Image (cartoon, rainbow, N blue to C red):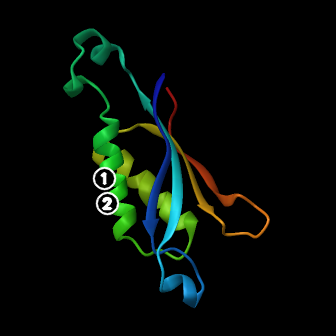
């Protein structure tokens, strides 16, 4: 299995459980690893044969930017579903963090894996 990845994608969104968090936009950071077979793209050297990380990144930015979830768990699950459903990704590992959410910590968040590794 080959992996196409996006690292430290930052998006501003409404996220959080407290009233003050519901009135502001906060930055979340996303790392994403996606199963892909890159051999066809490598042979053809054409984007149509590749897992288009730019298209995936733009879609994630749009989705997260428009969202207003309370929990990072919910946001992570929905982003994983979006990538798998819209881009045909069979397996992914997603790390979603919320910088500054816990005093004394750089960030907090969740790491999830969905699908089957092949």
Q: Nearer the viewer, residue 107 or 5?
A: 107
Mark drawn on residue 62: 2
Can residue 88 be seen?
Answer: no
Instruction: Determine crowd level at label 2: few under 14, some 14-19, many 20+ residues with C-alpha closer than 10 A.
Output: few
Residue farthest to the bottom? 19
Can residue 83 be seen?
Answer: yes
Residue 69 spot, x, y in % from top left: 47, 74
Residue 37 spot, x, y in % from top left: 38, 21
Residue 11 spot, x, y in % from top left: 44, 59
Mark drawn on residue 92: none
> What secondary structure is found at the residue carrying circle 1?
helix
Residue farthest to the right? 104
Name the residue at 36% across, 46% down.
Answer: 57
Judging by the rendered image, the residue that carries numbered circle 1 is 59
Q: Quadrant of residue 89?
A: top left
For residue 77, above or below residue 26: above
> What secondary structure is found at the residue carrying circle 2?
helix
Q: Are marks 1 and 2 in contact (CB under 8 Å)?
A: yes
Seen in the image, is 71 located left or right of residue 101?
left
Name the residue at 68% across, 59% down.
Answer: 107
Seen in the image, is 96 located left or right of residue 68?
right
Q: Nearer the viewer, residue 38 or 53?
A: 53
For residue 102, above or below residue 23: above
């Amino acid at each position: 299995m080959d992996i196409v990845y996006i690292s430290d994608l930052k998006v501003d969104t409404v996220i959080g459980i407290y009233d003050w968090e519901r009135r502001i936009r906060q930055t979340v950071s996303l790392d994403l690893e996606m199963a892909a077979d890159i051999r066809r793209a490598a042979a053809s050297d054409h984007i149509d044969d590749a897992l288009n990380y730019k298209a995936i990144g733009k879609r994630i930015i749009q989705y997260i930017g428009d969202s207003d979830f309370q929990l990072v768990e919910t946001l992570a699950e929905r982003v994983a579903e979006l990538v798998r459903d819209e881009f045909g990704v069979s397996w992914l590992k997603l790390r979603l963090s919320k910088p500054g959410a816990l005093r004394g910590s750089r960030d907090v968040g969740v790491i999830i894996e969905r699908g089957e590794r092949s």
